[in-house]
Image (cartoon, grey):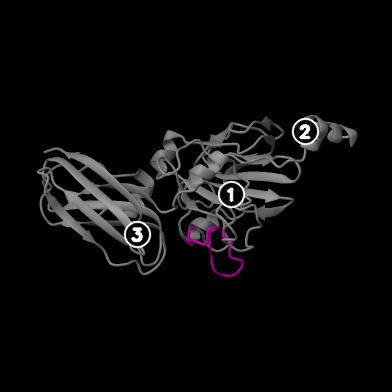
């Protein structure tokens, strides 16, 4: 049909072009201003399993039972202090805000009890019209930069990633509701309605840029480095990567910090010393279960030599590498 004929039919029906498209649901952009897989990471997706188990929208393990949103994290509280922007995924009217709760990781039963009733922490809710809402939780105290009733544009800064409310790691929890029903933005379907129907991101609410950013593996190497002693996860999530050790000491170790490992995954480590020789190469035992976040180390009980080291780690799953990282690290005497 010629274009002019189509236009005439639309006008003849008593509709303007603007009215004909007024009810189109907006596409959602990324709710963060950071690089997925580099400066921020997908930690968890909504749980699409309707029963007591858990499955992410792609039938993977990057979810936990009852989780109702997308968690995008930074590595540590040190990154929170630098300021990583949370932005509006689409234009709309701010429906509610909270900005007074402290950033304190809610570890264990006592930590969760302390934030009962305010689990979202500091956050923003945006009404996009036609029953579509987005919510942004766990933002940094004092960072929320919008007010209730204010109109915001897509990509406008709302605040910063934090660790307020029921947050065991620094992140923004992004959730979507349509007509009051919780929706998985990756598939556009109700949360708990089952995973893996059709191609990945079929029916998605995300725009093209967000789909591209979120299409990689949710298994990510958050950190990699050298150490003279075992590295503690508890310290990593607070302070970030430890400083490069000086030469000497009792051991030379490569450490890695990885998200979303699955049962059966193995970690392959390699260390090349400053003289170009392979100092250590080996793999651990297959993991006995899924691990949302995991830290490990390997190496030898020998003093750390000065010079430029090359270290690497690769996650092997069913015989195939799914994530890896390589770094060159200068060690001083």
Residues at discs 2 and 1 in contact (Cβ within 8 Å): no
Residue at the far front: name it.
1
Up-down relation of residue 2 to residue 285 (above or below): above
Residues at discs 1 and 3 in contact (Cβ within 8 Å): no
Which mark is first along the chain, 3 or 1?
A: 1
Which marked residue is nearer to the observer: mark 2 or mark 1? 2
| Residue corresponding to mark 3 | 320
Q: For residue 120, which numbered disc appears in the image?
A: 1
Which mark is first along the chain, 3 or 2?
A: 2
Q: CA distance from mark 1 to mark 3?
A: 38 Å
| Residue corresponding to mark 2 | 2
Magenta span of residues: 47-62
Q: Secondary structure at mark 2?
A: loop
Q: Give the total of numbered labels.
A: 3
Image position, residue 199 (x, y; %): 56, 55
Within-10-Å neighbours for mark 1: few <14, some 14–19, many 20+: many
Q: Quadrant of the N terminus?
A: top right
| Residue in the image at 79% along x and 32% along y | 18
Q: CA distance from mark 2 to mark 1?
A: 52 Å
Q: Quadrant of the C terminus?
A: top left
Q: Secondary structure at mark 1?
A: loop
Image position, residue 201 (x, y; %): 57, 51
Q: Look at the image and tell me whether residue 157 can be seen.
A: yes
| Residue in the image at 48% along x and 61% along y | 61
Which marked residue is nearer to the observer: mark 2 or mark 3? 2
């Amino acid at each position: 049909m010629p274009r002019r004929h189509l236009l005439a039919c639309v006008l003849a029906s008593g509709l303007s072009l603007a009215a004909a498209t007024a009810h189109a649901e907006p596409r959602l952009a990324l709710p963060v201003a950071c690089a997925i897989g580099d400066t921020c990471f997908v930690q968890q997706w909504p749980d699409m399993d309707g029963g007591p188990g858990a499955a992410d929208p792609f039938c993977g393990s990057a979810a936990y039972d009852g989780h109702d949103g997308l968690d995008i994290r930074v590595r540590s509280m040190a990154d929170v202090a630098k300021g990583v922007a949370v932005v509006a995924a689409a234009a709309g009217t701010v429906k509610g805000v909270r900005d007074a709760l402290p950033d304190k990781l809610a570890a264990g039963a006592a930590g969760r009890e302390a934030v009962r009733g305010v689990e979202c922490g500091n956050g923003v809710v945006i009404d996009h019209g036609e029953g579509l809402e987005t919510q942004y939780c766990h933002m940094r105290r004092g960072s929320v930069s919008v007010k209730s009733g204010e109109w915001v544009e897509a990509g406008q800064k709302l605040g910063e990633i934090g660790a307020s409310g029921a947050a065991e790691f620094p992140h923004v929890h992004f959730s979507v509701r349509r007509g009051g029903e919780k929706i998985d933005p990756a598939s556009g379907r109700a949360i708990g309605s089952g995973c893996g129907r059709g191609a990945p991101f079929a029916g998605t609410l995300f725009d093209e840029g967000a789909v591209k950013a979120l299409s990689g593996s949710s298994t990510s190497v958050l950190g990699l480095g050298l150490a003279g002693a075992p590295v503690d996860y508890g310290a990593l999530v607070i302070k970030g990567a430890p400083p490069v050790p000086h030469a000497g000491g009792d051991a030379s170790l490569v450490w890695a910090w990885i998200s979303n490992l699955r049962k059966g995954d193995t970690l392959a480590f390699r260390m090349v010393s400053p003289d170009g020789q392979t100092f250590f190469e080996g793999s651990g035992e297959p993991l006995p279960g899924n691990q949302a976040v995991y830290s490990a180390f390997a190496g030898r009980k020998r003093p750390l030599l000065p010079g430029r080291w090359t270290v690497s780690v690769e996650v092997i799953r069913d015989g195939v590498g799914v994530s890896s990282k390589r770094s060159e690290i200068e060690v001083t005497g």
